[in-house]
Image (cartoon, coloured by chain):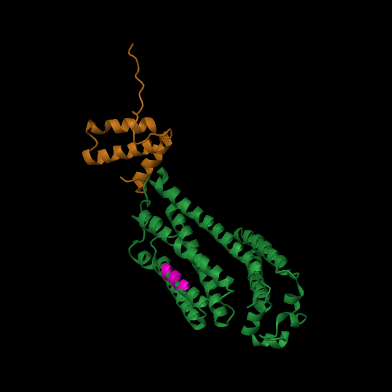
């Protein structure tokens, strides 16, 4: 079944838009199937879009506003907020356009899908490097503690969390959520739409429980990010991991909504796959802070 | 006229690197642990004092002495 047919089957209003119908034969209705049928290649030639420049302006305002805010310049907070709102708005409309182009207009052929797939993988690779730097910092500081902190780790007077309490409780939750997202993937491949939504609800619920525990842990923590190199490395690594969990959760929520709306099919669900890869990256990475920062570094 | 004998701390295999910061710090701690266990009077602790005084810069020792007086010394005493 061709992509255009899939779309027609999935979205009845397209039948009226494009004519033809499932049995119509695409080449007979070629003229009505605008871009898909009028081109003789499977690549997506994108329309001009204002979002790259609006995103760049948002990034500029965020950077300048951030520097101004941190140096207590007048209007710094305003410019920073404006820049962040601009970026968030750009993300929203840009992704909205991508969803329209892929799901509703059918531009994402198998060849086009390779782009976001490679893009997602390279993005995750860069994220691995990003978090690797924080574990490096933590290991650098704790394997040979300097004379300035007394040559001991954790430094004297720094209260550390018991790794066998909330941290240990929280560690299996993310891999469980990773198992649930695999369940959702199998449900999509088996065309069990409702079950896939259910599996994604389970995935997201486990993610929210994990973030809740992390919040509780931070709330009760005996030290903060200003407490010596221990606090700096601990909260930098665990905090950025937690931030990634939140991003992954939002990504999965979007996939759940799209699955509920019938956007994801057995043959075409790149967005879901990217979310699942990202989620496995986040859940596997949780094991490293547990072993090296909470457990080894806290005893 | 007697020769003046110049001596530094002996090589310690716990600290094989050129940078002897940790050696100095450890000897400082060993001296104060020794004094705490055996008292100021015994000659047993003299060797540790000689080691850390020959290894450590004066300012470091002054700083650590102040920290010990204030109860803010970070080392494992």
Q: Is residue A115 left or right of residue A232?
A: right
The spot of residue A282 in percent (x, y) is 48, 64
Position of the C terminus of chain A, as image quadrant, is bottom left
Up-down relation of residue A232 to residue A260 (above or below): above
Which residue is outermost to the top?
A: B1
Position of the N terminus of chain A, as image quadrant, is bottom right
Q: Residue at x 44, y 60 (%)?
A: A224
Up-down relation of residue B35 to residue A110 (above or below): above
A266 and A284: which one is in front? Answer: A266
A73 and A227: which one is in front? Answer: A227
Q: Residue at x 45, y 69 (%)?
A: A178
Q: Main secondary structure of the magenta part?
A: helix
Q: Is residue B40 left or right of residue A171?
A: left
Q: Quadrant of residue B45?
A: top left
Q: Is residue A253 left or right of residue B72?
A: right
Q: Quadrant of residue A250?
A: bottom right
Up-down relation of residue A270 to residue A258 (above or below): above
Q: Please give the letter of the chain rendered in green.
A: A
Confirm whether the magenta stretch covers residue B76.
no
Q: Please give the letter of the chain rendered in orange.
A: B
The spot of residue A77 in percent (x, y) is 62, 66
Residues drawn in magenta: A174-182
């Amino acid at each position: 079944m061709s992509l255009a047919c899939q779309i027609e089957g999935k979205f009845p209003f397209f039948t009226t838009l494009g004519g033809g119908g499932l049995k119509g034969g695409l080449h007979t209705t070629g003229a009505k199937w605008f871009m898909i049928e009028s081109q003789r290649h499977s690549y997506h030639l994108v329309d001009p879009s204002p979002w790259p420049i609006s995103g760049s302006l948002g990034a500029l305002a965020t950077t300048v506003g951030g520097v101004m805010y941190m140096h207590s310049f007048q209007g710094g907070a305003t410019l920073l907020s404006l820049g962040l709102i601009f970026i968030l708005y750009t993300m929203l409309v840009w992704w909205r356009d991508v969803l329209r182009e892929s799901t509703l207009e059918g531009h994402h052929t198998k060849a086009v899908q390779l782009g976001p797939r490679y893009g997602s993988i390279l993005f995750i690779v860069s994220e691995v490097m990003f978090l690797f730097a924080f574990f490096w910092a933590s290991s650098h500081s704790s394997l040979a503690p300097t004379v300035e902190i007394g040559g001991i780790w954790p430094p004297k007077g720094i209260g550390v969390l018991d790794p066998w309490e909330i941290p240990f409780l929280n560690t299996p939750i993310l891999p469980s959520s990773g198992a649930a997202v695999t369940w959702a993937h199998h449900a999509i491949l088996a065309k069990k739409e409702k079950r896939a939504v259910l599996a994604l609800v389970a995935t997201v619920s486990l993610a929210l429980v994990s973030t809740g525990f992390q919040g509780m842990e931070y709330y009760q923590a005996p030290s903060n990010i200003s407490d010596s190199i221990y606090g700096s490395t601990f909260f930098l690594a665990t905090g950025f991991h937690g931030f990634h969990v939140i991003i992954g959760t939002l990504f999965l929520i979007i996939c759940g909504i799209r699955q509920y709306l019938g956007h994801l099919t057995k043959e075409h669900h790149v967005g879901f796959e990217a979310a699942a890869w990202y989620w496995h990256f986040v859940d596997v990475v949780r094991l490293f802070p547990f072993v090296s920062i909470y457990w080894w570094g806290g005893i | 006229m007697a020769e003046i004998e110049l001596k530094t701390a002996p090589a310690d295999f716990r600290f094989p690197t050129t940078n002897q910061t940790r050696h100095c710090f450890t000897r400082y701690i060993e001296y104060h642990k020794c004094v705490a266990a055996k008292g100021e009077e015994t000659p047993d602790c003299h060797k540790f004092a000689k080691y850390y005084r020959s290894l450590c810069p004066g300012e470091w020792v002054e700083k650590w002495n102040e920290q010990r007086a204030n109860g803010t010394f970070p080392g494992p005493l």
